Amino acid sequence: MKKVFNFAGLVFAGLLLTGCASDKELRKLEVGYQAQLGEYATALKSGEITKAEHDKKVTQLNSRYGRRRAMMERDIYGSGIKSPGRRPTVGRGGRRY
């Protein structure tokens, strides 16, 4: 019985450490994202880049950040509940009561 408790404790500790490491990676990604946004804002304010260039860079950064965060969350939390191939539509056809 003691072996079972030791094994369960090791599994729990492993999962806890994995979760902490994963959260650390997400925080690191967020900090890098915020720093890059700050650099773009500073460059815009100092006149190094135009508003159009700033907007383009921010759009690209948001896209990369969103994809990377989604991949990391998928790796950490799994893919979740799979959506059905065909979703029911509301208010089209169907029965009338």
Image (tube, rainbow, N blue to C red):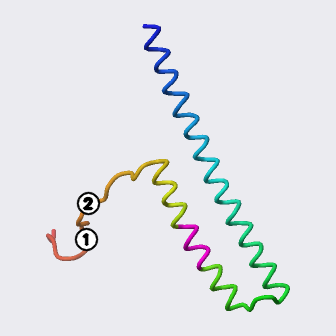
Q: Does the magenta run of residues contain 35? A: no
Q: In this view of the protein, which residue sits in the foreground, 51 or 14?
A: 14
- Coordinates of residue 50 in the picture (x, y in percent): 74, 92
Residue type, mark 2 in image: Pro
Q: Say which mark, if any, is on residue 89.
A: 1
Q: Does the magenta run of residues contain 62? A: yes
**Position of residue 94 in the picture relative to residue 58 (left or right):** left
- The N terminus lies in quadrant: top left
Q: Between marks 2 and 1, how big is the CA–CA gap?
A: 13 Å
The residue singled out by tag 2 in the image is 84
Q: Which residues are magenta?
A: 60-66
**Position of residue 79 in the picture relative to residue 50 (left or right):** left
**Position of residue 93 in the picture relative to residue 35 (left or right):** left
- Coordinates of residue 46 in the picture (x, y in percent): 85, 85
User: Going 58% across and 67% down the picture, which residue do you hit?
Assistant: 65
Q: Residues within 10 Å of mark 1 (few under 14, many from 20)?
A: few
Query: Residue 47, located in which quarter of the rendered image?
Result: bottom right
User: Going 78% across and 85% down the picture, which residue do you hit?
Assistant: 44
